[in-house]
């Protein structure tokens, strides 16, 4: 029997990208000749949000068009800066490797474009343990737009489509760091894990099956 592990990427399988986000935001603010800067604490409170949301927070008096341009600039310079910071999260490679050794499937489903999420997974050195990567924003407009599509619903659609291809599927395990990730898992009938970095407060308001700060806790799913 096979278990499908559906992972969010940012805030779960990686670490230190929050430092890249801070540098990107502050670079854009500098280019606007503004003296204000975002702090790491502020970035962490918003982490997982869209680029548009960061600049909506930082520049509430800017027009939507100007915020959109700031977000687009952030997207443009973001990958180059992220490459200097991003690392695999603590125990991420070990956990993914153990799951793979047991014959189960790891996939990543991220609010990004397919090409960008592939790049992030590769940059973090985790690609060999991931069977497939899925970016649910095919046109990279989500991160720079005012509007918002249902991330949970779209992630659930991808996971269910992938799950249908697996013979002898035993169950789905969904791991993420946002309420949308947990919603996606619930819509798939998955066992849900809400991961939170150890240095952040747990978000008890999000009703996941398990709240964890150590990725090794996921391995109990393959030891049952």
Image (spheres, grey):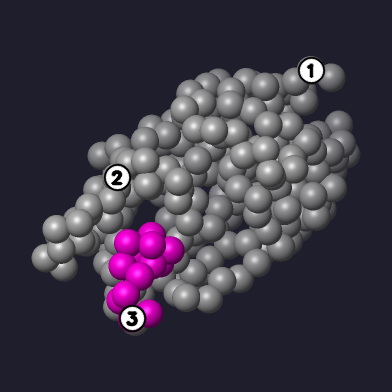
Q: Are marks 2 and 3 in contact (CB under 8 Å)?
A: no
Percent across and percent down for residue 224 are: 84, 19
Q: Earlier in the sequence, mark 3 or mark 1?
A: 3
Find the magenta span and give its range.
52-64
Q: Residues within 10 Å of mark 2 (few under 14, many from 20)?
A: few
Percent across and percent down for residue 205 are: 68, 44
Q: Earlier in the sequence, mark 2 or mark 3?
A: 2
Q: Residues within 10 Å of mark 1 (few under 14, many from 20)?
A: few
Q: Residue at x 32, y 62 (%)?
A: 58
Is residue 62 covered in magenta?
yes
Seen in the image, is 37 located left or right of residue 210?
left
Q: Residue at x 44, y 31 (%)?
A: 88
Percent across and percent down for residue 102 are: 72, 23
Percent across and percent down for residue 164 are: 82, 53
**62 or 154: which is nearer to us?**
62
Q: Residue at x 38, y 62 (%)?
A: 57
**192 or 167: which is nearer to us?**
192
The residue at which mark 2 appears reads as: 39
The residue at which mark 3 appears reads as: 63
Q: Which mark is residue 223?
A: 1
Quarter that holds the N terminus: top right
In what element is the residue under mark 2?
loop
**210 or 125: which is nearer to us?**
210
Separation of disc 1 and disc 2 at Cα?
A: 41 Å
């Amino acid at each position: 029997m096979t278990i499908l592990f559906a992972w969010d990427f940012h805030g779960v399988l990686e670490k230190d990208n929050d430092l890249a986000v801070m540098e990107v935001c502050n670079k854009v603010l500098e280019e606007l000749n503004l003296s204000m800067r975002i702090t790491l604490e502020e970035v962490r409170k918003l982490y997982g949000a869209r680029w548009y949301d960061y600049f909506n927070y930082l520049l509430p008096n800017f027009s939507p068009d100007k915020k959109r341009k700031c977000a687009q600039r952030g997207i443009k310079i973001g990958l180059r800066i992220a490459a200097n910071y991003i690392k695999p999260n603590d125990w991420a490679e070990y956990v993914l490797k153990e799951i793979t050794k047991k014959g189960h499937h790891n996939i990543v489903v991220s609010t990004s474009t397919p090409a960008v999420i592939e790049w992030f997974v590769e940059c973090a050195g985790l690609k060999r343990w991931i069977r497939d990567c899925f970016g649910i924003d095919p046109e990279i407009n989500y991160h720079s737009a005012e509007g918002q599509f249902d991330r949970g619903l779209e992630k659930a659609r991808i996971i269910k489509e992938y799950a249908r291809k697996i013979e002898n599927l035993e169950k789905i395990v969904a791991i993420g760091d946002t309420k949308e990730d947990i919603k996606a898992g619930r819509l798939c009938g998955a066992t849900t894990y809400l991961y939170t970095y150890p240095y952040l407060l747990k978000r008890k308001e999000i009703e996941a099956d398990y709240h964890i700060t150590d990725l090794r806790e996921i391995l109990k799913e393959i030891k049952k």
